[in-house]
Amino acid sequence: MDFVYFKTFMEVVRCQSFTKAAEQLGYAQSSVTAQIQKLENEYGVVLFERYGRIMRLTSAGEELKKYVERILALHEESKQQIAKQSIGQLHIGTIESLLPFFLPPIISAFRENFPHILLNIHPSTEAGIIEAIKKGSHDVGLILDRPCRDDDLITVPIREERMVLVASPEHPLTRLERMSVADFNRQSLVASEPGCTYRDALEKLLTENNVSYELNYELGSIEGIKMMVRLGLGIALLPYIAVAKECQERNLAVLPFAHPDIRFQTQVIYHKKKWLSPSLRRLIELLQQNGPQEAEQDQIPPVPHKN
């Protein structure tokens, strides 16, 4: 049933006249009459009775009026809610090393504008996130990678993420003033899961330089990696944002290693054909606002050199 008929019905109820209702709606009177007749045929009842020049509802018309009021109110509410996109859900893909350290303050700010949006957060690898975005199962992705270039995706660079090599404060490598690729020789690595961009980059760098290293521990948990390193079981490459607390508390030491092949950006990605609802647009804006944080990088404590 066309909503126009219901609106015409309610206008006749208000005006108590086909003629006046037609004037208010900008219709010919015959059009109003035809719409009311279609409603009567649809429901199989008479909706109005004429008393002189006044149209009054029949008992069936009174009953239909109750339903039409609810229908039109729900229709208006649905338009307002859908336009604001203040309810519903968003699916966010992110890597595990950014999830607990980068997203919480952004989610908190997002909640101020959209408290009823359900955020489904899916930890995955960069490749998995990109695939999910392309398939449409994720609305937006947060990755740590070299600049992403894909014809199907919109990429929004957020910041260059500081990557650090960490070890136990008692590890022999902390005695070095400067660490080279050759210093990885015969070292034990604690690595993230396969498919992790910075793990793959480090292993590629070591392989290309013919460095023999030992991959003794492979974990999908950042907290697990940090615990292994604290126990002196190896060294690990991680985003500084994930180890800042431990480094400041001197439970982990940042080794003096840097290499141009180990540089990555935190990036927001979404499909180029994705409709940006108000809630999704706000989320992307908040992610962009959390850009370069130079002060955070300056807080990296020096390695406690040992004699």
Image (cartoon, rainbow, N blue to C red):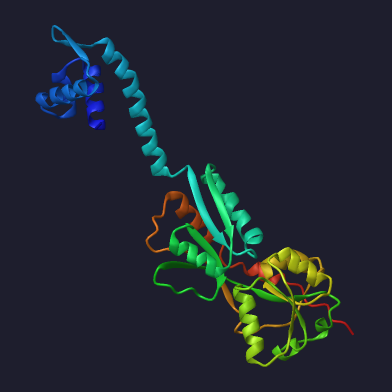
The residue most toward the right is 307
Closest to the observer, 21 or 6: 6
Instruction: Residue 121: give x, y in percent of width and height.
Output: 57, 55
Let me know if residue 159 appears in the view.
no
**Residue positioned 84% across, 79% down in the render:** 171
The residue most toward the top is 51
The residue most toward the front is 44
Q: Is residue 87 left or right of residue 265?
A: left
Q: Is residue 99 left or right of residue 130?
A: right
Q: Quadrant for the C terminus, please.
A: bottom right
Q: Is residue 267 left or right of residue 21?
A: right
Instruction: Residue 202: give x, y in percent of width and height.
Output: 65, 81
Closest to the observer, 225 or 43: 43
**Residue positioned 31% across, 23% down in the render:** 68
Residue 24 is drawn in which quadrant? top left
Instruction: Residue 26: give x, y in percent of width and height.
Output: 15, 29
Residue 112 is drawn in which quadrant? top right
Instruction: Residue 252: give x, y in percent of width and height.
Output: 79, 71
Let me know if residue 147 appears in the view.
yes
Is 166 situated above or below 131?
below
